[in-house]
Amino acid sequence: MKFKKISAFLLLLALVAGTLSGCSGKETVNVSSENAPKAQTEANTEAVASEVKLPLCDELTTLTLFIPLDGNMATITSDYNENKFFQELEKRTNVHIEFVCPAIGEEPTAYNLMIASDDLPDIIAHNGYHYVDGLDAAVDDGYYLDLTPYLETHLSNYNKLRLKDDFFAKSTVTDKGRVVGFYQIFSEPQPPYKGLQIRKDWLDDLGLDVPVTFDDWEAMLVAFKEKKNAYAPLSIGSLGYNMDSNSMSAGYNVLNGFMNVNGTVKFGPAEEGWKKYLTKMNDWYEKGLIDPDFMTGGGYMPDMTLITSGQCGAWDSMYTMPALYESSSEDKNMQIIPVASPVENPGDEVHVRLADSIIHAYCTISADSPNAELAMRWLDYMCTEEGSLLANYGIEHESFEFDAQGKPQFTELVTNNPDGLSFAQCMTYYALPPSLIGGDYDWTRELSSVPEEDVISMDVWGSVSDDYNMPAGISYTSDEAKELGEIVNNINTYITERTSQFITGVMDIDTDWDSYISDIKAMNLDRAIEINQAALDRFNNR
């Protein structure tokens, strides 16, 4: 493993220098498959799952698992072994898990130090951190186990799950045709869970219709400011755009990253639509229609106090939040509804939104694990009907019951916890916390706590296309990942600064736009586009 040791040393040096690239805070699916064409997918569609015999081992055996501590779980306990799901899983499998949980917020650093130390646990749960050169390189460098030879044996249930759909099959292999990650695969696609929301009670009081165009929005925001004394009529997020959903720039058909425009890669912040977006936000900023403190406000989610105190009338948030906003506000007339992204003209087609969730976080197994076979069978159990039911809903007659249609439903222990735990806390305590370990994920379990009028948010936001989004399944070669990471890090730092400056008027959008574009191109934007185009082409030609 000489190369592995050298790689670890270089990685540690890079970490100390603070120059690591390729580790983003957002979970992505790094997949592509030049060597796993459709023929391979079709050949495996008849995969058959094997019966899992419990317990998995005669004597209690310990596996080590590097895993972040779920935020909701952290409010209850810092030890996953107190989680009811993991307790029951241990009873069934006779496998004890020794959890390695880095401090919240320090997960990427802890992961990189772990890789550099060459001392890996049996299983690694990836959530916002990845091997810098990609999964193939992680196998070639001797860190992760290639799971491909075990798909029909120790991972047969997972293999059946990943082959039930062509997209899943493509999105769970690497450039070299390997299966390395054990992915979380959604039982059914989850529509966009984040988008624009407004105060419907304010609209009614002011005699306004639900806004459609940017002009409609401006009239509404002016009324919110002048008639409702809103300090921040619109919240746009601390970066100057709505993270993930890009819900305000969507009407100009741009997002804050690389886009797939009919098979051609473009970079949103360098497009004319982004200039229009910044021009509009600057105009609204000057008119006092957006949060004057947006740069210090909420990032991914808006400042809750701003909303519940009646200082804000429109924002971008998750579909699970309106009921919480309403119940937390002293204004008992507060009514929040979802709305579509504004457009320039009625009837304009929109191609940008938060994409449907189909495949998510993944686990890898360490190449040197002495318990690799057991680790695979332990993960595979969560792809069985029995195992996935336990992971998603917990224990029957305790945290869930079957309804008349045979569908599991959480009991009041979860939905109305006698100890005062919230629904989110209960889901992480009595079942497997979401986005941590792969397997068959039933996202509809969270609907138990969401009023029907808020569930329709996903239909409102999902009524437009997301075809300008880059496919979640593309991946890069090791060389591409290194080069792209450096370019994108530099460009993103620059754009973050300039976006706020354009919106606040520190830079003039008319006179400074050309120099802004020149600066981005000087940072090798064209090369970054070229790399993404190659990755997209490989994905499309798979």
Image (cartoon, rainbow, N blue to C red):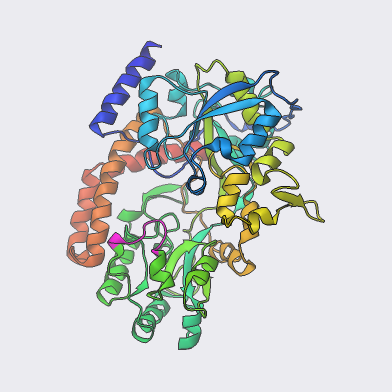
State left or right for residue 297 relative to residue 404. left
Q: Residue furthest top?
A: 2
Q: Position of residue 194 (x, y in %)?
A: 50, 59
Indicate the quadrant where residue 227 lies. Answer: bottom left
Q: Is residue 17 left or right of residue 448?
A: left
Examine the rendered structure and indicate whether residue 266 appears above or below residue 67: below
Eyeballing the image, is 122 above or below 398?
Answer: above
| Front in this rendered view, residue 39 or 191 | 191
Main secondary structure found in the magenta portion: loop
Quarter of the N terminus within the rendering: top left
Q: Please identify the quarter of the rendering in which residue 62 is found.
A: top right
User: Can residue 65 be spotted in the picture?
Assistant: yes
Whether residue 40 is visible, yes or no, is: no
Please tell me which residue lies in front, 392 or 22: 392
- Residue 531 horizontal side relative to residue 209, left or right: left
Name the quadrant of the C terminus. Answer: top right
Q: Position of residue 367 (x, y in %)?
A: 50, 18
> Residue sitting at 23 percent across and 63 percent down?
502
The picture places residue 497, in percent across and down from the top left corner, at 24, 54
Please report the residue visible at 40 percent of the width from the left and 38 percent of the height from the top.
103
The residue drawn where x is 26% and y is 34% is 19
Magenta stretch encompasses residue 301: yes
Provide the residue span drawn in magenta.
295-303
Q: Position of residue 202 (x, y in %)?
A: 46, 82
